[in-house]
Image: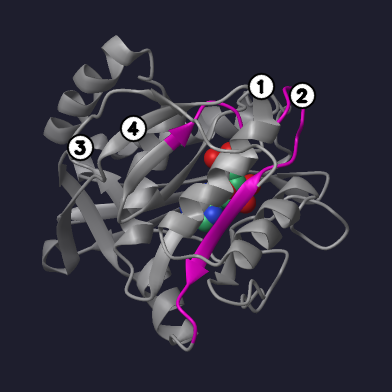
Amino acid sequence: MKEDFISVRMHSSLHGNHHSGAERLCGEEELEDVSRQLLQRALSHERGQADKVFLRFDSVPSRSVCHGCLPDMQTIEVDGYREGRAAARELLQDAGVSACAASMAVNSLSGGAAPGGANMRGAMLVDAETGLRRESDPARGVRAKGMDISPDAEKMLRMALEPRGLDNDHVREAMVLAAKVISTPGIIAELCWSDDPSYTAGYVASANGYQRLTHLKPAGDELGGRAFFVRPQSSLAEIVDYLENSFLLVTELGRFLESRRWTGDPDE
Ligand code: AMP
């Protein structure tokens, strides 16, 4: 492969259900390491070892790769997941999502957003006004692909996250994914919490930054997912094309703001 970048994608399943997935964009010299890391993830996941793993490489010419910046990051402390979900609804409304769309997305994720109450492979596309789901396949959803962080920017990111106790794969990868999602024309916000049972934090990302909520689900809960909120009347085909087929390399960091406590009304 003589191209400047290689898109590496891993998707694994267990007993026919989604197990784990990851997307990277790397140089040829990093390909073996990156492939090993992704394979490792599928084989030693806390939800068990995958029984089917797909690893795919695609060459990407450097002229197809845009450079971008991470969103500003702030941790918002909440007492437990109920408060976290109330805070998420409020942050989504601050970003321009209607109260009804925010509630519908929180409810879908908490019950398992795929048919039958399972986890989706990708994200829901939620109309930011009506809350209606617009993805064509409610089990697969839409996957953001083709994003990564440059080695130099990653070093700086790790130095910024480490003293905050946040230098882990979850946070780093989610920040890069959020950078791509909120740069998508037609998307105004993202809501995420993990499907890993022990990882209970999550975030809302929007033009207001990457707002990390310390709890969005109870420990032990295997349900998680993502919602991408789309402007009403925006072209779904263009949104999906951008998320799945464009390439973004993060080369700059945003600001790291002081943590704050959420002070809103948990019953809102
Ligand atoms: P994770 O943060 O890896 O635990 O992922 C949580 C959920 O987010 C997964 O179950 C998927 O539904 C969704 N998800 C993970 N990666 C992506 C992606 N690249 N694009 C869209 N949705 C994703």
Look at the image and say whether residue 205 sits in the magenta stretch: no
Quarter of the figure with residue 141 = bottom right
Apparent side of residue 46 relative to residue 165 in the rendered image (left or right): right
Q: If you read the primary sequence from the N terminus, does the residue marked by circle 1 or circle 2 appear first?
A: 1
Say which of marks 3 and 1 sits in front: 1
Q: CA distance from mark 1 to mark 2?
A: 6 Å
**Residue 146, label in figure:** none
Q: Are marks 2 and 3 in contact (CB under 8 Å)?
A: no
Q: If you read the primary sequence from the N terminus, does the residue marked by circle 2 or circle 4 appear first?
A: 4
Q: If you read the primary sequence from the N terminus, does the residue marked by circle 2 or circle 3 appear first?
A: 3
**Residue 29, label in figure:** 3
In the image, residue 95 above or below residue 177: below
Residue 128 image point, x, y percent: 53, 71
User: How is the rendered protein coloured?
Assistant: one colour
Residue located beneath label 2 in the image = 220
**Would the CB of label 4 be found within 8 Å of ligand 1?**
no
Q: Nearer the viewer, residue 203 or 63?
A: 203
In the image, residue 124 above or below residue 121: below
Q: If you read the primary sequence from the N terminus, does the residue marked by circle 1 or circle 4 appear first?
A: 4
